[in-house]
Image (cartoon, rainbow, N blue to C red):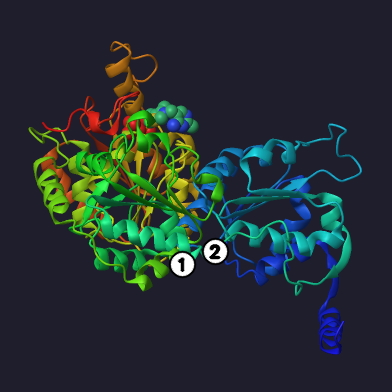
């Protein structure tokens, strides 16, 4: 070892301090620049909560662990920083499983700390013992059980590194109570050393060259921009590249906002409830450049019909995604931002796409998203358009899962990155409202609106307590169709109109529910009341819950029915 290295080592050790595992944890969170933790205490994690008390690190007490983890997800999605969630062992830990799975499939960086029973009793069915390593193995990017306080600093550092680098994802740290009470040396200066984990960030130049050449010769190119563009913070590069090459852009559900929704070259979202133009662009393309998207089945429709004429270039930081669902001619492993920068620098010769672009603009004009607003019953699509108008397109929008989610994706135009927060891969009802709480912490000065179904809201409504406690100015819009709307739609279309357990014969009084938490509640029943009510809602400085009664029988269109290809969309016109 060189003398320089040796002296650094001595210096580092001189900084290392003796402390308990729980104080190491809180200290490490401070080193990682964590400014808010979402969680819920309990027996096995009490030593850590004692440190939270002593240090005053900001902790938001959810009213159910599921609320805490979805808030951490919303925070991560909007801030681009890892979300941190701390819960106790057993039921506290199992209550965050859905959120972990949600973050895994949507690539959200989370560090989840679960208390665990003492190492001396692990495996004895001790009080509040659950095998979180076993349970979360397939739904975490990585998980750790800390067996000795000496390894705790290294583990926390690795956890943050793994959660935030490469393809982001959730990392779980299972922390036995005796480890959090034991003392050891806190040395947080060591570099992360993971020889087996070295994500490729810079793409191969030859592969980039192949993309450039393909663009030059393509007559019908299209870019499919997914959430990977947002995770890589590459929206500006995408805009510059599109400007340079004039290639039309289609978004995935989770990629919305990565490219301005109102740009001329934006064709909308593709997939089951995407625009006809976006789906036809993919179907007719001769070159498909996918950036940070994973060809989810809700996007592709029947794979046998997917992009039948396209040469596929797939840019992804996760090599496992490339060729997984769609045969790929040009694999490009790397970070979306780096790939786009290289593509821009190559200054490839622009292909002759004029005819293609003209054809697509024609489609866009002929097949806009549509709905019919007649009479006094509010159409949910109209409601979303009005929210877009009132918020001037600047709100952070979170949604739950169901019809209202698809209408939000269709009718709120996302022009900025990280203003759209939705549960895509897992489709987790109960996600949208707590995610809005995390989003508000990430962007305290932005208007945040949670657009939620009447059913999904009831899954995590207890987090109204956080709004009451902290006066968070979140606007909750319940798109109330008195139904599990998306389930009802499928029963109508594919199950002979047998509405099995999908219609609500009774509902809670949502206004009174809000008022029980000292939150302003509003109800809107008819179209003529809507505009002024929305203005009142969004002008109000504090939290507001609006119960907006909408048409009960409305369906989400257009639609690719199960088994159909993207070119076989139904309901493309009124
Ligand atoms: C936790 C969970 N359970 C069940 C489902 C299946 N599911 C998808 S959409 C939906 C209905 C949602 O109803 P609501 O929240 O009122 O939204 P709407 O479709 O009416 O807009 C259901 C039950 C789900 N996605 N998540
Ligand atoms: Mg509903």
Q: Quadrant of residue 43?
A: top right
Q: Residues within 10 Å of mark 2 (few under 14, many from 20)?
A: some
Count of marks, rendered view: 2
Residue 277: x and y in percent read 20, 43
Q: Are marks 2 and 1 in contact (CB under 8 Å)?
A: yes
Q: Is residue 23 above or below residue 572?
A: below
Residue 358 or residue 309, whichever sits in front: 309
Residue at the outermost right position: 120
Question: Residue 131: where, in percent of width, then height?
Answer: 76, 37
Could you tell which of marks 2 and 1 lies nearer the N-terminus? 2
Task: Evaluate whether residue 220 shows in this view.
Answer: yes
The residue that mark 1 highlights is 338
Q: Decide which of 535, 182 is in the foreground and name it.
A: 182
Image position of 259 (left or right of 158): left
Name which residue lies at 22% across and 52% down. Answer: 219
Residue at 31% across, 34% down: 272
Q: Position of residue 263 (x, y in %)?
A: 20, 59
SS class of the residue under badge 1?
helix
- Queried on whether the Cβ of the residue with tag 1 lies below 8 angstroms from ligand 1, the answer reads no
> Is residue 236 positioned above or below 555 on the image?
below
Mark 1 nearby-residue class (10 Å; few <14, some 14–19, many ≥20): some
Please tell me in which quarter of the rendered image ligand 1 is found.
top left
Q: Secondary structure at mark 2?
A: loop
Q: Which residue is mark 2?
A: 201
Which residue appears at 27% of the width and 18% of the height?
Answer: 493
Q: What is the quadrant of residue 310 in the picture?
A: top left
């Amino acid at each position: 070892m060189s003398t320089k290295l040796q002296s650094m080592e001595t210096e580092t050790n001189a900084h290392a301090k003796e402390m308990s595992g729980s104080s190491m944890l809180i200290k490490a969170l401070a080193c990682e620049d964590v400014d808010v933790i979402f969680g819920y205490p309990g027996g096995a994690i009490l030593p850590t909560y004692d440190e939270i008390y002593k240090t005053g690190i900001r902790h938001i007490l959810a009213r159910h662990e599921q609320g805490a983890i979805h808030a951490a997800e919303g925070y991560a999605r909007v801030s681009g920083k890892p979300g941190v969630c701390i819960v106790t062992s057993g039921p506290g830990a199992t209550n965050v499983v859905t959120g972990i799975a949600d973050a895994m499939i949507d690539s959200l960086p989370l560090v989840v700390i679960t208390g665990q029973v003492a190492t001396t009793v692990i495996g004895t069915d001790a009080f509040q013992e659950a095998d979180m390593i076993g349970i979360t193995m397939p739904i975490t990017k990585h998980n750790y059980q800390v067996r000795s306080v000496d390894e705790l600093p290294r583990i926390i550092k690795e956890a943050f590194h793994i959660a935030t680098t490469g393809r982001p994802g959730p990392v779980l740290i299972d922390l036995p109570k005796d480890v959090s009470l034991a003392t050891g040396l806190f040395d947080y200066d060591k570099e992360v050393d993971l020889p087996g984990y070295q994500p490729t960030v810079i793409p191969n130049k030859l592969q980039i060259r192949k993309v450039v050449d393909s663009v030059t010769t393509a007559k019908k190119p299209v870019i499919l921009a997914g959430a990977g563009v947002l995770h890589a913070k590459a929206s500006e590069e995408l805009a510059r590249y599109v400007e340079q090459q004039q290639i039309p852009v289609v978004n995935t559900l989770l990629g919305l906002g990565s490219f301005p929704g109102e740009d001329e070259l934006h064709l909308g979202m593709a997939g089951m409830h995407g625009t006809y133009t976006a789906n036809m662009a993919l179907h007719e393309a001769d070159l498909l450049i996918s950036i940070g998207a994973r060809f989810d089945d809700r996007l592709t429709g029947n794979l046998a019909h997917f992009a039948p004429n396209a040469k596929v270039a797939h840019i992804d930081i996760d090599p496992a995604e490339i060729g997984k669902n769609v045969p790929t001619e040009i694999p490009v492993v790397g970070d979306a931002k780096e790939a786009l920068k290289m593509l821009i620098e190559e200054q490839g010769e622009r292909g002759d796409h004029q005819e293609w672009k003209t054809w697509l603009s024609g489609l866009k004009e002929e097949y806009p998203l549509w709905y019919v607003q007649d009479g006094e019953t509010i159409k949910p699509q109209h409601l979303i358009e009005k929210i877009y108008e009132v918020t001037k397109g600047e709100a952070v929008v979170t949604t739950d899962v169901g019809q209202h989610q698809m209408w939000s994706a269709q009718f709120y135009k996302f022009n900025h990155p990280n203003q759209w927060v939705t549960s895509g891969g897992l489709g987790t009802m109960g996600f949208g409202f707590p995610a809005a709480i995390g989003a508000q912490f990430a962007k305290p000065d932005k208007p945040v609106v949670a657009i939620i179904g009447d059913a999904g809201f009831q899954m995590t409504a207890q987090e109204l307590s956080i709004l009451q406690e902290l006066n968070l100015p979140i606007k909750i819009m319940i798109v109330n169709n008195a139904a599990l709307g998306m389930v009802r739609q499928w029963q109508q279309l594919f199950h002979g109109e047998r509405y099995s357990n999908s219609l609500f014969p009774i509902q809670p009084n949502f206004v009174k529910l809000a008022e029980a938490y000292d939150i302003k509640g509003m109800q809107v029943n008819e179209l003529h009341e809507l505009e002024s009510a929305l203005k009142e809602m969004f002008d109000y400085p504090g939290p507001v819950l609006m119960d907006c009664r909408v048409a009960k029988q409305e369906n989400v269109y257009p639609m690719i029915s199960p088994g159909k290809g993207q070119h076989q969309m139904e309901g493309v016109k009124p």
